[in-house]
Amino acid sequence: MNAHALLTAQGWRGAGHSLHPTSDSNGLTHHILIKRNQDGAGLGSKKDHKQEAWWLNAFDQALKGIDMKSGTMKQTLKGGALEKITARNVATKYTGARGLYTSFVRGGIMEGSVNDPAASLPTPPDSGAGTPLPTEPDSKIKKDGKREETKEERKARREAKRLKKAEKEALREAQRRAAEKVEKKKAKKAERQAAKEKLKAGETKEERRARRDARRKRKEEKRRMSAVK
């Protein structure tokens, strides 16, 4: 694509002029320049990136300023990077009205969900007192130590028992109907077999031959129809 011809067709006045139709004071009179990265901080760089870790350098500087010759630790460094960060009433890039640390907000304290944690702890076995068992307000304790069921629990138990009994009755009824169906099928088959035997006993040879031929024709016709489909 010829960019020069395309821009000229759109009204550009040519090289050395901006895209403005009449004045060169508006816009650029040259092409957009690409910034080249020459700091060597890209992929494969061998630059020591620890120099950019200002917090690490600040602590190293403070540690190097400690004097141990007198037998006690004494900081001899004045005006170090760490001191600038922790200094009070001094406006730097870390402190002051526009400092870095003013962006941090102190969070609140999360309270526990249990008001009295000690009340929920079990009693130690050697304390001589037993841990009270949790009881429901409408439940009672029998003489044998077991809890007596409530009205709702008794009602739910009876309802579950009734449903279980109804399921058993439905299963037995389904099995009975299936057995009756099988017996009816056997009876019909036996009845057809008896009628067939009776027919064979009373027919002559010609009738038997005609019946067999008719049955053979029906089978062939059925086979031919299934082949056509």
Image (cartoon, rainbow, N blue to C red):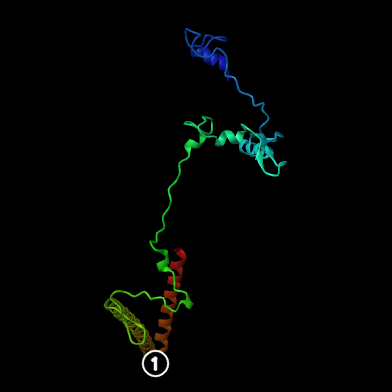
Q: Position of residue 14 (x, y in %)?
A: 55, 9
Q: How many marks?
A: 1
Query: At 53% across and 14% down in the image, what residue appears?
Result: 28
Location of mark 1 (residue): 201
Query: At 47% across and 37% down in the image, what residue appears?
Result: 103
Crowd rating for badge 1 (residues with CA inside 10 Å; few <14, some 14–19, many 20+): few
Q: Nearer the viewer, residue 219 or 229?
A: 229
Relative horizontal placement of residue 25, taking residue 180 as reference (left or right): right
Q: Quadrant of the N terminus?
A: top right
Relative horizontal placement of residue 126, taking residue 50 as reference (left or right): left
Q: Position of residue 46 (x, y in %)?
A: 72, 34
Q: Quadrant of the C terminus?
A: bottom left
The amino acid type found where label 1 is placed reads: Ala
Query: At 67% across and 37% down in the image, what residue appears?
Result: 65
Q: Position of residue 166 (x, y in %)?
A: 31, 81
Figure check: 5 above or below 157: above
